[in-house]
Amino acid sequence: MPRKPLAPADPAAASDHDWADYLRANGLRATRAAIAVLKALDGADLPRSHEELEAQTAPIDRVTLYRVLDRLVATGLVQRIASSDRVGRYVAVQSQASSYFECTTCNRVMPLPEDPELPQLLGHLRRQLEKQGLESALTVFRVQGTCAACKLRAAGRSPHQTE
Ligand SMILES: [Zn+2]
């Protein structure tokens, strides 16, 4: 299978025209909705839920958004990640949205603390995979657990309570 054409090297500077070329190069129609979704996902630092994308790409309607996401996932430009709340979250395969923490109680998703060793570690893992002949298109590093607020609530000291 031929390698997929790369997304614009500098997504922040990419024009709608660049995204349109990228979509067409991957056999998709370059609709306004598809461009808006790609741009929203590529600029995101965390995986986005359908609801968040809907807010971000308004006034694109829900049905159109579902169709666009289905097509992007089918061509491998976007990956759907199932989380513990069964809400699918989406990441652009080219984007840097690769490490995050997910609270399994409230399902909040937040970035992992900055750690200069993490990209190195992921790079190391990728090279190990390549040695085995496996080419990774997306590495997602997800830590699941309990966030600080849920931990407090579980301990019976709700941070939202006022005395
Ligand atoms: Zn939580």
Image: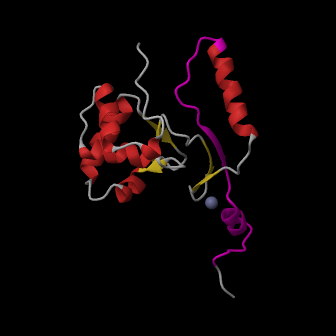
Please tell me which residue is depicted at 55% across the width and 43% down the height of the picture: 97
Which residue sits at x=52%, y=26%?
A: 137
Query: x%, y% of residue 149?
Result: 67, 66
Residue shown at 67%/20% (left/top)?
127
| Number of numbered discs | 0
Is 100 covered by the magenta stretch?
no
Using residue 106 as the reference point, say whether residue 7 is left or right of it: left
Determine whether 25 is above or below 84 in the image: above
Position in image of residue 77 (x %, y %): 41, 32
Left or right of 116? Residue 29 is left
**Observer-nearest of 161 and 35:** 35
Residue range of the region highlighted in magenta in the rendering: 131-160
Q: Is residue 107 left or right of residue 90?
A: right
Residue 89 in sight: no
State the image coordinates of residue 99 (x, y, percent, origin top left).
62, 43
Residue 132 is left or right of residue 91, and the answer is: right
Counting from the top left corner in percent of width and height, residue 107 is at: 56, 55
Figure quadrant of the N terminus: top left
Q: Residue at x 59, y 36 (%)?
A: 140
**Quadrant holding ligand 1?**
bottom right
Residue most toward the bottom? 163
State the image quarter where residue 5 is shown.
Answer: top left
Q: Nearer the viewer, residue 141 or 29?
A: 29
Residue 156 covered by magenta stretch: yes
Question: Is residue 4 visible to the viewer in this orientation of the structure?
Answer: yes
Which quarter of the figure is the C terminus placed in?
bottom right
Q: Is residue 122 above or below residue 68?
A: above
